[in-house]
Image: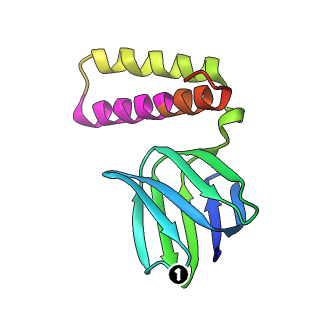
Amino acid sequence: MSTFSLKIISTDKVFYDGKCEYLVIPTIDGEKGILAHHENMVIAVEIGELRFRKPDGEWVTAVVSKGFAEIVNNRASVLVNTAEHPEDIDVKRAEEAKERAEEQLRQKQSIQEYYLSQASMARAMTRLKASRNRRGDI
């Protein structure tokens, strides 16, 4: 299978920089799959699980926050606020973040605060889902 260059960058690190056969990006209306020689485009990345297959056949999963992906000349660049391996997720901390977000959503808030609380809840839920999938607790 053909490969393309993939670089996943978060605010604090380069999560991955190498070759890739297949990339699946979480988007607002589902998932978007990218193969080698994909048309040039920019995609909004949503909070969720990004997956890619390396040339050796290994699938890698990353829990990502919002950002964007640019596909140009057989290269994909994904820029997100956070990207982490499911096995690196602190489940206790994610549970606490979910509880905080639930409490914030129950309180009267401005529209901006409401959207921030929603984003916190989505991130916590995605982190918990990914960590459970990794452990096989589905």
Q: Nearer the viewer, residue 67 or 61?
A: 61
Q: Nearer the viewer, residue 19 or 66?
A: 19
Magenta extent: 110-125
Question: What is the quadrant of residue 10 in the picture?
Answer: bottom right
Task: Residue lying at the far bottom in this picture: please name it.
Answer: 73
Residue at 52% in and 81% down: 37
Which amino acid, mark 1? His
Q: Quadrant of the N terminus?
A: bottom right
Residue at 67% in and 50% down: 60
Residue at 58% in and 46% down: 82
The main secondary structure of the magenta stretch is helix
Q: Nearer the viewer, residue 134 or 77?
A: 134
Residue at 49% in and 71% down: 70
44 up-or-down from 75: above or below: above
90 up-or-down from 34: above or below: above
Q: Residue 24 at what x, y percent from top left?
A: 51, 57
Label 1 sits on a secondary structure element that is: loop
Q: Residues within 10 Å of mark 1 (few under 14, many from 20)?
A: some
For disc 1, the marked residue is: 37
